Structure formats: structure tokens, C-alpha cells
Image (tube, grey):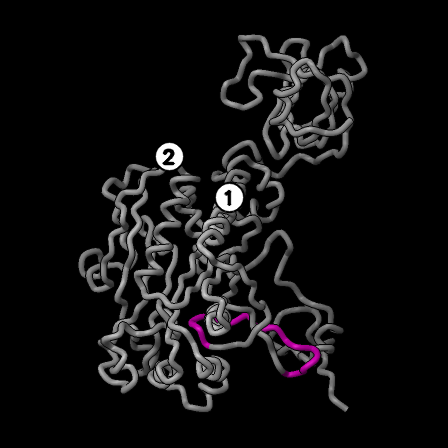
Amino acid sequence: MKRILITETPNYIGGKVKVSGWVNVVRSHGKILFIDLRDGSGILQVVFLPQEADLYNLVKEVKPEWVVGIVGEVVKRPANMVNPKIPTGQIELVAKELKVLSKAETPPFAIDTDGYEINEEKRMQYRYLDLRRERMQRNLKMRHKVIQFMRDFLTKERFIEIETPILTKSTPEGARDFIVPSRLQPGTFFALPQSPQQYKQLLQVAGFERYFQIARCFRDEDPRADRQAEFTQLDLEMSFVDREDVMEINEKMLIEIVKRLFPTKQIQQIPFPKITHQEAMEKYGTDRPDLRSDLSNNNLLAFCWVTDFPFFEKGEGSGWTFTHNPFSAPKPEYMDDLLKQKNISKILTTQYDIVLNGAEIGGGSIRNHRPEALEAVFEIMGYKKDRIKKNFGHMLQAFKYGAPPHGGIAYGLERFLSVLLQEPNIREVIAFPKTGDSKDLMMDAPAEVDPKQLKELQIQLSAKAPGKFIKKAKIQKKK
């Protein structure tokens, strides 16, 4: 007999069906035994009657979280036992057969709660169990729906989804790169992308006027509470646009996401208010202002755009560094100052951030598509000509072959979702997150590797590094 989903059982009243899943609860009511069976679609009450002696005795051995298959007859519940809170609350399954598919040890923590009361490191160590809880199932299913909506929306708006490389070149973009040694080119390294920034701009040069990607990004940052070493962006770029064009289509998408997928939420103001960086800092003391008029209303969403950021700020020492990324264009009225490298502290960029309830959920800009303007940015930052060519020569070369004006935005999907789902941090909307110091407690990573792998890569570990393989790993000398 073919298995059906639990949510389909109300369609089979009076019929015989097979269901499979996890035992959520085992309970008794007088002489009658009940199992609440759980699968990916919902929960079903299964009844075991004492007159089915063999089956009745077998179910007495069953424990929560065992995986079982059950064949039985779907019947209407007695009126006084109807449960209106679940889709299967009108019916129950009278069991005729039960097969134990997998036994389970007692879980290290309860999974029938929301999980907030449990030590987070323990939850991450046993993440495959933590993900069984209803809240986590809801979060990841809603994550899927939001991403699918974004894909459908952008496709209708003539965007093309294009994947860009994970193994790329290490270039200064604001955070440390994760580097990957090359076995075939000893002594050289790939880097994991902090974002698809350069690739998406090169796609504009290639003539793909509207690009998007659900992109994995990697940043080797110091421990921070609400950051992850790897995360997901909605990344998009558009040709022949100005700042208002990009903001308009993104605002439309955000409004549609809330209306379609979060109908109980209320957007405080449409169109979204726009405030300059200077106004935000003077009035709110932050460039991520929470504009909600009622902080006690959990369903209130206050979006706003923050614009006109300073392009440069003082970095370590006396030099300049970029405030967001080096690929942004200045506002048109500041282009001459950029090219002449004067009045640097007063140059404003076309950067725009989208803020939701005090959290920056995305940011973008109109880009520098003229090679001389991009080169001027790096010169202001103190880069010599040879370093600019080494790190960004591919971009400058590409821009010489006809680059359209272009701009885009990238959303931190996890941050956006955590606000919408009212979760305290982004780990609650990631299937397998890492700790604040980038450890995977479930897989026990990062971990040592076999000395043979290090030899193949011609890598020798420092004597100061921890690990039992250090003394065994020797560099493989070239002949």
C-alpha cells in the first residue's frame, strides 16, 4: 500500500490508508492507547484498541521519536474529541497494522517546546533533533517560501538567475577572506567570495542587464553575536538605472512579500520613508533607525531607506577607507572631486541601505562603471598602481570594453527573515548554523586534516599551532 501524507488523511474517511512518520506522543485514555504521529505535513491521532491484542501489545513498547509505519481506517472523531487547532482534528486513524521502521534513543532535550529554554550549544550539537521542533520546521519552510517568491517575482521582472563561482580571487572587500590552497598550483590560493560583487558587475559588462542570485557568501570575521562565517544573500544587479530605479523595484518586492506571505503584518508607511545618513545620525544616533510608532506591536513593520552615505572615512592610521564597498559610484555632483581626489571627507556615495525595525536587511549602490573612477577610489585609499592592477586589473580591463551604468543591492536573507519571524537571532532561520566563533558543534568543525593532505598542498603547520599532526606534516619539496 502506498503511503500518503498525514494532511491528506481527511480525504479518506471510511477508507484504509498507510501513514509513516515519527511518534510525537504516546498516551493512554482508559484502556485505549493513542499515538500522535508526526510527519513533514502535520500530526495525526492514531487509536489502538485492546481487542487488537497483538497490535495493542506491540504499541506498548513504542517510545517517542520512534519511526513507524501504520495502516488503519480513517474515521470521524467523536464530537467531544474534535480538535479544531489542527487540520486533522476532525478525524483519527484506527490502527490495523504497525511496523517499527527505526527505534530512537531518548533525545537529549525536549523537542515539543519552542526550544528557547534549552542551551543553544546543545541545540546546535544535536541540530538534526532541534530541527524537528514545530518552530524550526515553520522557520525553514517560510524561508523556502520567501526565497521562492523572490525568484518568481524577479523572473517576472525580466531578471535572470546566474550562479557565480565559489572559488575566486582574494581581493580587499572589507572583511577577511577564507582562503583555499590550490594543489595543482602550489603556493597559490583561491578565496571564498565575501559577495558576488565583482562577478555581478562583470555580468553587466557581459550584457545581462538584469541578474539575480541566491548567493552563498563567506567572511572570516572575528566573533560577533549575530553574524555567521557563511550566510545567504539575495544578490541582484541592473543596467541602465539610477538609484531611484533600483529602490523602486526592491520596494515593490518587499511590499509583495509581506502582503502575500505575512498577511498578519502591517507595513507602517508606504512608500517607505527616505532619510539621509546625516539625518539618521543627527536624529536617531544610528544609521539603522527603528521607526516603529508602536514598539509593543509585534506585527508592525517599519521599513525605511537610508541614503547619501559618506564615501570615505578615516581608517587605521591617517589613511582613508571606504564606508561600504569600493565599487560604489559617488553622487554625480561629487564625481569631479573623486577624480581629482579632493574634498575627500565631503564626497557622498550613491549607497542606499534598506532598514527594517532597526535592522539593516540590505544595501546597495550605483556602481563606478568608468575605470578611471574606480581606480581613483583605490588611489584615495593609498593603493599603488601595481597593487590596483594586481587586485582589480580584471575589473579595470573589463570596463574598457563598454560598461553600462549599473547598480544593485544585496539582502542578508537571514537577517530579513529573523525580523519577519520575530526570532532573536539569525541562527534560528539557518538549518545548520555555526557558533559565534565559527564552530560547527554538530560536525565538530573546523578539524585537523590528515598529514597526507597537507603534503599534497605543500603546507607545513607552525609549531605553535595546536593539533596532533603538526610534527608529522612536512612540506613536500619540489624536485
Between residue 377 and residue 175, name the one nearer to us. 377
Mark 2, secondary structure of its residue:
loop
Q: Main secondary structure of the magenta part?
A: loop
Q: Amino acid at mark 1?
A: Lys
Rendered image: mark on residue 264 = 2
Q: What residue would you read off at disc 1?
A: 145
Q: Amino acid at mark 2?
A: Thr
Q: Dot 1: within a 10 Å radius of its alpha carbon, few (fewer than 14), some, or many (20 or more) residues?
A: some
Contact between marks 2 and 1 (CB within 8 A): the answer is no
Residue 194 visible (yes or no): no
Task: Name the N-terminal-most of marks 2 and 1.
Answer: 1
Estimate the x, y position of residue 285 in percent, counting from the top left: 23, 59
- Residue shown at 70%/68% (left/top)? 449
Residue 123 visible (yes or no): yes
The quarter of the rendered structure image containing the C terminus is bottom right
Q: Which residues are magenta?
A: 172-187
Is residue 106 depicted above or below 419 in this figure? above
Q: Dot 2: within a 10 Å radius of its alpha carbon, few (fewer than 14), some, or many (20 or more) residues?
A: few
- Residue shown at 73%/18% (left/top)? 16
